Amino acid sequence: MKQRMAVGGLVLVLALCLAGCGASGPSLTADELAKKYPDKKYVNINGVSLHYEQEGLGRPLIFLHGIPTNYLLWRGITPALTYGNTIYNLDLMGFGLSEKPQNLTYSLDTYVGQLGKLIENFHLDNPILVGHDIGGTIVAIYALRNPGKVRKLILMDAPLYSAAPPFTAYGIMVRLLRTKGIGNLLTGDWFLKRFLRGGVVTQEHMTDAILNDYLKPYHDDPGARTALLKSVRELNLRPVLENEVQPNLGKIQVPTLIVWGADDPYVPLELSKKLKDDIKTSELYVVLQSGHYVQEERPEDVRAEMKEFIDK
């Protein structure tokens, strides 16, 4: 009851908070992005310019973030993994420094297709796929659709079941964003900061400087907030999870590391335990004293566990 009252209070505050709403406008084109960020790398995937960071040399590792973060989520993880690995840290379409087209559908099929094209274009043989949040959903679907083409999987705080508890803050926030009118009012800085801060146990781990880094792309690109709404509204998450992912998790045969925050308020820990039971080749690492953004709260522990799993 207390949890429902707290979430209800949060919803009321969010619904009434009209200040700080983000401006919207045409998204930056591929040429405009290249001029704005001349030192960044881009790859054209199915007509969309996607930003990526590449470092290291060796077997390929691909990192995908979730909503509403970007490639910076992995800044405390990837530097320790470059020995023996080539890391591709990708900004999903609509996020970070990638293009944010307003005439495309931001569905899971679109994102999985773009990941496949990236692997194909870069000639990456049996990559290790790492995904957090929706990024974890994307890499899991890719592995299911492409058996034998993935070396290992790392799934982190990823929504892979449709039957999540209905009164979580995450569920309420997503429903608000999907609501026309209200959703348009809730893409401003206040909402995004509240969402990111709500994903950590210790507030000192989500500093103003970190928040500003995550929010900078929303300031730089007039179409970023529209893209955020499109991604939430068009992912088509529930039917894909119910019809394709959940019935087939047992078919994942590759070694899989499941990493979860012990106090994740958005994708609860009990779902990670169910995931471990469903994926027979998996092992579960619970990150203590952390929430949804384990990369921000316990980067040393997370990267050590990931490195051990990758090097096996």
Image (cartoon, grey):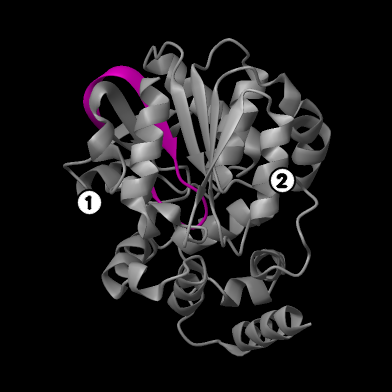
Q: Is residue 19 above or below residue 184?
A: below
- Confirm whether residue 273 shows in the render: yes
Residue 237: give its label: 2
Judge from the rendering whether residue 307 lies leftward or rightward of residue 3; answer left or right.
left
* Badge 2 density bin: few <14, some 14–19, many ≥20, Cα 10 Å: some
* Viewer-nearest of discs 1 and 2: 2
Q: Residue 294 sits in which quadrant?
A: bottom left
- SS state under label 1: helix
N-terminal of the pair, mark 1 or mark 2, is: 1
Amino acid on which the number 2 mark rests in the picture: Leu
Q: Going by the image, does 233 lie left or right of 254? A: right
Residue extent of the magenta highlight: 54-72
| Count of residue discs | 2
Residue 111: percent from left, percent from top: 56, 35
Identify the secondary structure beneath mark 2: helix
**In the image, residue 72 lies at what x, y percent?**
33, 51
Separation (CA) of disc 1 from disc 2:
33 Å
Q: Residue 36's mark?
A: 1
* Residue 70 falls inside the magenta stretch: yes
Q: Residues within 10 Å of mark 1 (few under 14, many from 20)?
A: few
Image point (64%, 38%), residue name: 108
Task: Pick the residue in front: 184 or 281.
Answer: 281
